[in-house]
Image: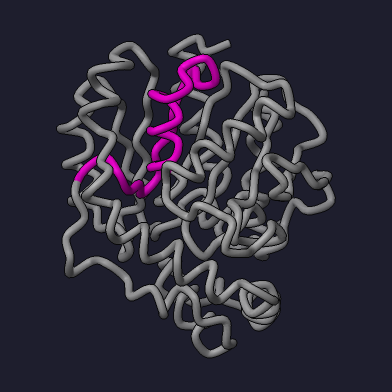
Amino acid sequence: MTSDRSRPFNYGRDQVISYPVTVGNIRTRVVESHGGSTPLVCLHGVGSRADRFIPAIPGLVARGFKVYAIDFPGHGFADKDSRIDYRPRGFAEFIAGVLDELELSDVIIAGTSLGGHVGARMACDRPDLVAGLVLIGTMGIASLNESDMVPPENVANGSESAIRSKLGFLVSDPEKVTDSWVREESKINSSTGAHQALLAAAGYVNFEANADIQGERLAAERPNLPIQIVWGTEDRWTPLEMGRRAKEVLPNAQFVEMEGCGHAPYFESPVEFANILSHFFKKESVR
């Protein structure tokens, strides 16, 4: 039997459907679970895509979540061009439009890195849409040290060698970085328009990580919102100390460290991640 931490990068793809959604003439892709009831919207980080959450989806569905993972514009299979606002605020407005198109409201948003920044902004800009937050190795709550900012070219480079290096930086276990995963990621991140889109998005992530911080606003405007902060203890992209500072900014949030995980703990230990969310939101009685 395959253990929780040794599942392949494409585990769970037979348990989802995917389809396009267009908002403001910009098309994206939604990955949706077959089952579940409590809506959980998963938002990835810069340079990533909706697929990163798929290995966690079977466990999340088994615990009652109806999962939607969405490609940000400029990422994955979404449109990539100069019309797009690649700032976190632009992504927040776009994802809100996708949820409106899907007729979803009162969802839990689980956002990693850039996705957490976007989710925090959405919780304030569109409180009707957001009933709970999971902030995973997140930007936009506590400040990011300049020394921890990843050069945009390292995110935007779609060559197989650069992708292998980036994925090795993402996860704690290098054995998870397989040739198949590297090849697929490279094919997507070197597609037409991807380099410029990812270069722009990564540049904004670095700048607005500290210029557009949402932590104090979130604490003031949504003091009763159930918030769970999840951080991999081996996170090299947003170090653990940043998570502890985020907890200080959001004192009512629950802070959980996932031992031995890097920047994508939901990908590295999907069953543990599903259990963490299930226990928290059952206690909070969301939905």
User: In the picture shown, does residue 179 fall above or below 37?
Assistant: below
Point 41% across, 65% down: residue? 202
Most distant residue in the front direction: 83
**Numbered marks: total:** 0
Question: Magenta includes 132?
Answer: yes
Q: In which quarter of the image is residue 284?
A: top left
Instruction: Name the spot of residue 262 as percent of width and height, x first.
Output: 39, 60
Asked whether, in this view, residue 60 is left or right of residue 171, the answer is: right
User: In the picture shown, does residue 155 fall above or below 76?
Assistant: below
Instruction: Name the spot of residue 84 as percent of width and height, x first.
Output: 56, 55
Instruction: Name the spot of residue 98 as percent of width and height, x first.
Output: 66, 35
Which colour assignment does the render follow?
Answer: one colour
Front residue of 53/177: it is 53
Q: Quadrant of residue 230?
A: top left
Front residue of 272/180: it is 180
Asked whether, in this view, residue 85 is left or right of residue 69, the answer is: left
Asked whether, in this view, residue 112 is left or right of residue 106, the answer is: left
Asked whether, in this view, residue 107 is left or right of residue 111, the answer is: right
Looking at the rendering, in which quadrant would you find the N terminus?
bottom right
Looking at the rendering, in which quadrant would you find the C terminus?
top right
Point 72% across, 57% down: residue? 11
Front residue of 216/64: it is 216
Point 42% across, 51% down: residue? 87
Front residue of 218/3: it is 218
Q: Which region is colored magenta?
A: 116-142
User: In the picture shown, does residue 1 fall above or below 230?
Assistant: below
Q: In which quarter of the image is residue 155?
A: bottom left
Instruction: Name the spot of residue 127 as percent of width and height, x first.
Output: 46, 17
Point 63% across, 73% down: residue? 193
Question: Magenta includes 207?
Answer: no
